[in-house]
Amino acid sequence: MNRTTGIRDNARALRRLAIVTLLGLACAIPARADDLKDARSALAAGQLETAQQLFEKVASQGFAEGRAGVGLVQLRKRDYVKAKEAFELSQRMDANLALSWYGLGEVQRNQGDCAGAIENYRKAVDLDRKFPEAQLALGDCLREQKQYAAALTALTPGLNWGPKWRHLFLVAHGNVELARDSLRDAGIYFTQAQQAAPDDPRTNRALGDFYLKRSIGSLAIPSYQRAVELDTSDVELRHALGTALYFDQRYNDALEQFRWVVERDGEFAPGRFSLGKLYYLSGAADARRYAEARPHLEKYTELMPADARGWAYLGQDLYYLKMKTEAIAAMTKAAELGEKSKDMYTVLGRAYVDNKEWANAIAAYEKGDPNTQDMFKIGQVLVFLGNTSGADSVYQGMIAKDSTSSEAKFAMQELGKLKFRLKDFPGTVTAMQRRIALDPNSDEAYYYMGLSYKEMKQMPEAVEALRQSVSLAPGKADRHFWLGIVLSSMPDSSDVSAAFLMSSTEIDSTGKNAAIAFQQLGYRSLLAKEWGKATQLLERAVALNDKDVSTLVWLAQGYQNAGNKTKAIETYRRVLQLDPGNADAKKGIQSLSN
């Protein structure tokens, strides 16, 4: 075969290959078109698995439209990572496919980055001058960025794209007017849209959104209900209806809608948040709701980790579930993300108080809206921090607000206790007298007044106040104890004093005051030469406080006088271990040694 013949044979082979290839392409193009059409129909019907299989089939043939279609399915599934991967791959396959740029914009918008999505939407509409979905998305993001003039410029062409799209662009115009507080113009656009397409759920929803944004839930509900009738499967519609019912204070109906949303699509973040929030707010009436709120709020923070609201509500919910450490961590996260909720900071303040983190508690309360009980806590925390002037100001403010209220009574009492700690005993008496004038049955007011009189050496007044305290609170050991102590300093009151000291030990036989009471009673018995009774009482005092030198000296003397030489010497030696120079102990040992 010569060279010329070989060339002719190769040429014929190439022509045959070209014909076969063209025939293959001719067959593939209709097949691809059919698969795309079927895939889009399945996607529109919500048959996501079927749609994905068909789009994958088209993509496997090397067509970028198929890979972008896979991205659209992942968008519907709210798997934004996979959606982004699919759109980026389709973009590499065909950089001029507008759908790829639109899809990337949708991923960004759904992740809360409308500012970043704008450039992708612009690229999409530049590549396809009549791409309604991209044009609407561009206008919506420009509106969200408060670029209202640019939004209207982007949306205006769509008003002339025929009846299939006109009503949606009217809705978009209404949203722009609503965003810039042009309520009259917004209402006109929404009404025109609904009239143009009364059986389109989107126009009915838009009218509902209009009323809801004006906080008129009762007017929004009928529009949302109509939209739901027209599209029973849309979770966003159901969520909007639930939100309107919530605003209208129809909480049980709202709860039903939010439950439906979460059951239908557990990955729909707004549904998780609304259900968790409603459960949490119901916790004030039924504490069991806090446990029901928790999994939904936790899921929301997984889906939307950058949303401060989710962490704020989760933290508050955990606080009422008595999970203080986890609650503080969640609310701290919310604060770092910029949460400003006064309710959250109030609860955070309570959590810090429970955790005894005083400085953090005050800082949180300053950003919150503390109620009366919180104000009492703030006053006490300021005392712990040594800020007595601040505590005084808190209590004085509560009294000034309404001096006859129950809260003011308690504030007067706390103010009196504060003055007592500051050793302002006349001030304590004045505060407690005001308290008693409002409520003569306050044992604590009489108690602190009696202790203040004692410090001022006004013993008759002290006895009178403490007697009243004992009468009002006979079950409190410290009332009996201090009345006994004060009476011990008054003439002809020894037996009465002893009776109150003894009654204090009967109520509380293990406390700090009990050690002193047993000591005083033992000493009285020692003076009365009742050696057995004296040592018994003093032994109980030592058992509670074995470092009190006076108690040990008296106990040793009791043993010595009772003839118990061994225990006497042993006890004197314990005294010398605590106080090596104690003269009574040295003298006692010397006398026993002789």
Image: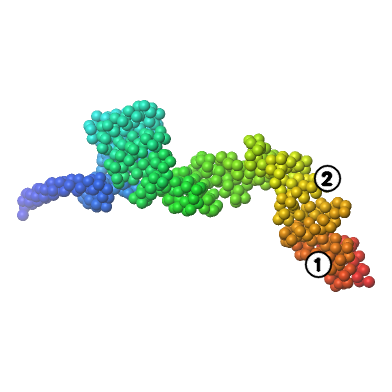
* Front in this rendered view, residue 174 or 560: 560
Task: Mark 1 or mark 2: name the one nearer the start of the chain.
Answer: 2
> How far across and how far down the image is residue 375, in percent?
62, 42
Q: Secondary structure at mark 2?
A: loop
Please name the residue shown 45% across and 46% down the image.
277
User: Relative to residue 190, is residue 378 depicted above or below?
Assistant: below
Element type at mark 1: helix
Residue at figure coordinates x 84%, y 68% from the top left: 532
Task: Write down the residue under mark 1.
Answer: 536
Left or right of 241 on screen, residue 468: right
Q: Is residue 108 left or right of residue 53?
A: right
**Taking the image as drawn, is residue 270 in sight?**
no
Distance of mark 1 from mark 2, alpha carbons?
34 Å
> What amino acid is labelled 1 in the image?
Gln
Quadrant, the N terminus: bottom left
- Residue 366, quarter of picture: top right
Nearer to the camera, 131 or 324? 324
Q: Amino acid at mark 2?
A: Gln
Q: Residue 270, how many percent across, how many down?
A: 39, 45
Residue at x-position 9% and y-position 50%: 16
Q: Is residue 291 visible?
A: yes
Marks 1 and 2 close (CB-CB < 8 Å): no
Residue 458: give its label: 2
Q: Residue furthest right?
A: 594
